[in-house]
Amino acid sequence: MKLRFLCPAHGIELANSPERARTCFETGLDTGYLLTEQGLYEEALPHLGCAFEAAEIIFAARGVERERAYSMFTTATVLLSRVYSALNQHEQGAHICQLAVRRLLSEASLQPHSEQAITRQMQEIYRYTHQESTVPVQMRVGRRKAPRPAHFATIH
């Protein structure tokens, strides 16, 4: 499964320039979304993959207000996962969601004051999986390690 959409040099460039990372995110997200709306999932995949990686860079760089960074990351996660599912690559879509939840849980342990914002983002990812509309107890932010939720194994 390809989880690297940015070449290493481009990733380093974006990590050194939060503004360029934001531009990469916005361009990738917009282009990927438009292609998805047209049913061009194969073409949308690299754009949304770049948006996802740019969102991770923004998330880590702390150059953006935290809630905005969480929202960008979640939006890219859900759209990328949807494209994988549309391409009948459900396992990859589920894997993207799992990675995002782990990243958000890690952030929660480092930023306890952001618990509500992080929980909202995890709920958004969870809603995407077409399950219940609330985060299960084992995924709540207060725990350092969350067991792998069973519902992430298959995304409809």
Image (cartoon, rainbow, N blue to C red):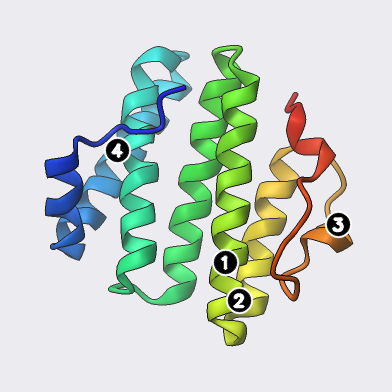
In this view, the residue in front, 12 or 25, is 12
Q: Which residue is mark 1?
A: 106
Q: In the image, is residue 43 above or below residue 61? A: above
Label pair 2/1, CB-CB below 8 angstroms? yes
Q: Position of residue 3 (x, y in %)?
A: 41, 32
Which three-letter amino acid code belongs to the residue tagged 2?
A: Ser
Which three-letter amino acid code belongs to the residue tagged 1?
A: Ser
Q: Which residue is mark 4?
A: 28
Mark 4, secondary structure of its residue: helix
For the C terminus, give its image quadrant: top right
Taking the spot 60% from the left edge, 76% from the top edge, the residue there is 109
In space, the residues marked 3 and 1 are separated at their CA atoms by: 17 Å
Q: Position of residue 145 (x, y in %)?
A: 71, 63
Q: Which residue is mark 3?
A: 136
Q: Position of residue 94 (x, y in %)?
A: 64, 33
Q: In the image, is residue 38 above or below residue 11? A: above
Residue 109's label in the rendered image is 2
Which three-letter amino acid code belongs to the residue tagged 4?
A: Gly
Between marks 4 and 1 in the image, the one whose residue lies nearer the viewer: 1
Residue 43 falls in which quadrant of the image? top left
Which three-letter amino acid code belongs to the residue tagged 3?
A: Pro
In this view, the residue in front, 7 or 87, is 7
Between marks 4 and 3 in the image, the one whose residue lies nearer the viewer: 3
Q: In the image, is residue 94 above or below residue 68? A: above
In space, the residues marked 2 and 1 are separated at their CA atoms by: 5 Å
Q: Position of residue 137 (x, y in %)?
A: 87, 63
